[in-house]
């Protein structure tokens, strides 16, 4: 049973922060767990009690990512509680973030990307051409989901070889378009009028939609990729805009691209963020050597 304070916090997260149902459900579970284990409950908890609870998470076998989410739930709840006057101090203020190893990104092979595009395009209607274009753009340019969905129609005027993209922090960068992506764009643009909302011929977005914002949402993009993955015989859990961005970076490095070039194309402020792809590329190349080189095979 959640307390009235927790219910009020979750309502605020839903209304003011537009938190997803999954996020709300996770926070509800996290706060219910803490409410039941912190002596006196969350509102009466001391900093020492909250720290003791948090230290016990690892002993209970919870992963670092789960502990991090639980810490986030507590921190946000107590900030809200302070604002509401339910507590006079934040007992979670001394909690340190749990150390997490940086996981290597999931990467699709080139053949899997080919299968994904082919499966998306197969029905041949306007929605299928849009799906194929989205996949080609994400893979050819390393765009983030937010970046591809925010592209205006004017960005692809005159068949550009590069897109001007506004990324994190409002920074602009050039994102390349290979011949296949440009061809997919041309084909989609011919079919785009069929997808325009009625009475919205002046819709400014490249990937238009009948939704409130006039453009595709991240959720709809995820659904499009899930459907393409299933049609291609791939696990939808292994396919996402970020996975295609990872594939873009990894395949460039495998092809001999300079790390600084990849950093620029991805829009990374710090090259250490880009360096994780060198590990992925090295692992994949090492596997090729082990499996293909005569001296790498067992019994060779």
Image (tube, rainbow, N blue to C red):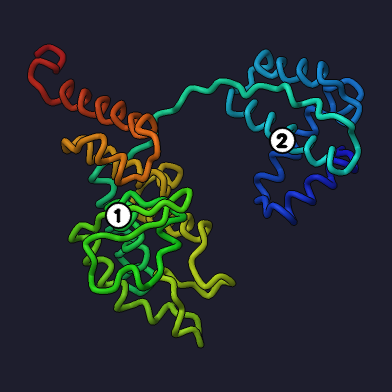
- Residue at 15%, 23% in the rendered image: 289
- Residue at 51%, 57% in the rendered image: 218
Above or below: residue 77 compared with residue 300: below
- Marks 2 & 1, CB-CB < 8 Å contact: no
Q: Quadrant of residue 243?
A: top left
According to the image, label 2 marks what residue?
73
| Dot 1 alpha-carbon crowd within 10 angstroms: few under 14, some 14 to 19, many 20 or more | some
According to the image, label 1 marks what residue?
174
- Judging depth in this view, the residue of 117 and 90 nearest the camera is 90
Horizontally, residue 202 falls left or right of residue 271, namely right
Above or below: residue 190 compared with residue 264: below
SS assignment at label 1: strand
Residue 93 appears at what percent x and percent y?
74, 26
Q: Quadrant of residue 298?
A: top left
If the image is split into quadrants, where does the C terminus sit? top left
Q: Quadrant of residue 277?
A: top left
Give the mark nearest the N terminus, 2 or 1: 2
SS assignment at label 2: helix
Residue 55 appears at what percent x and percent y?
71, 15
Horizontally, residue 16 falls left or right of residue 180, namely right
Horizontally, residue 65 falls left or right of residue 282, namely right
- Judging depth in this view, the residue of 283 and 224 nearest the camera is 283
Q: Nearer the viewer, mark 2 or mark 1?
A: 1
Above or below: residue 226 compared with residue 1: below
Above or below: residue 58 compared with residue 279: above
Label 2 to label 1: alpha-carbon separation: 37 Å
């Amino acid at each position: 049973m959640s307390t009235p304070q927790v219910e009020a916090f979750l309502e605020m997260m839903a209304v003011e922060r537009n938190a997803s149902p999954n996020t709300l459900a996770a926070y509800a579970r996290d706060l219910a767990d803490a409410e039941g284990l912190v002596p006196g409950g969350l509102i009466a908890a001391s900093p020492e009690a909250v720290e003791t609870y948090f230290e016990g998470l690892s002993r209970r076998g919870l992963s670092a990512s789960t502990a991090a989410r639980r810490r986030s739930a507590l921190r946000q709840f107590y900030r809200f509680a302070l604002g509401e006057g339910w507590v006079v101090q934040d007992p979670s203020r001394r909690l340190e973030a749990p150390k997490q190893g940086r996981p290597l990104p999931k990467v699709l092979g080139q053949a899997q990307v080919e299968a994904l595009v082919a499966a998306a395009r197969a029905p041949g209607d306007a929605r299928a051409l849009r799906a194929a274009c989205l996949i080609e753009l994400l893979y050819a340019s390393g765009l983030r989901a937010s970046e591809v969905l925010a592209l205006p129609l004017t960005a692809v005027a005159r068949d550009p070889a590069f897109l001007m993209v506004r990324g994190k922090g409002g920074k602009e960068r050039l994102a390349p378009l290979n011949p296949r992506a440009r061809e997919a764009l041309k084909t989609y643009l011919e079919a785009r009028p069929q997808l325009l909302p009625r009475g919205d011929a002046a819709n400014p977005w490249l990937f238009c939609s009948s939704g409130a914002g006039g453009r595709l949402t991240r959720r709809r993009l995820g659904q499009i990729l899930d459907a393409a993955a299933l049609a291609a015989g791939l696990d939808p859990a292994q396919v996402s805009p970020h996975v295609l961005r990872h594939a873009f970076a990894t395949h460039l490095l495998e092809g001999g691209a300079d790390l600084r070039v990849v950093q620029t194309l991805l829009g990374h402020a710090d090259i250490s963020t880009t360096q994780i792809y060198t590990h992925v590329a090295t692992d994949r190349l090492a596997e090729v050597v082990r499996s293909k080189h005569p001296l790498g095979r067992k019994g060779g």
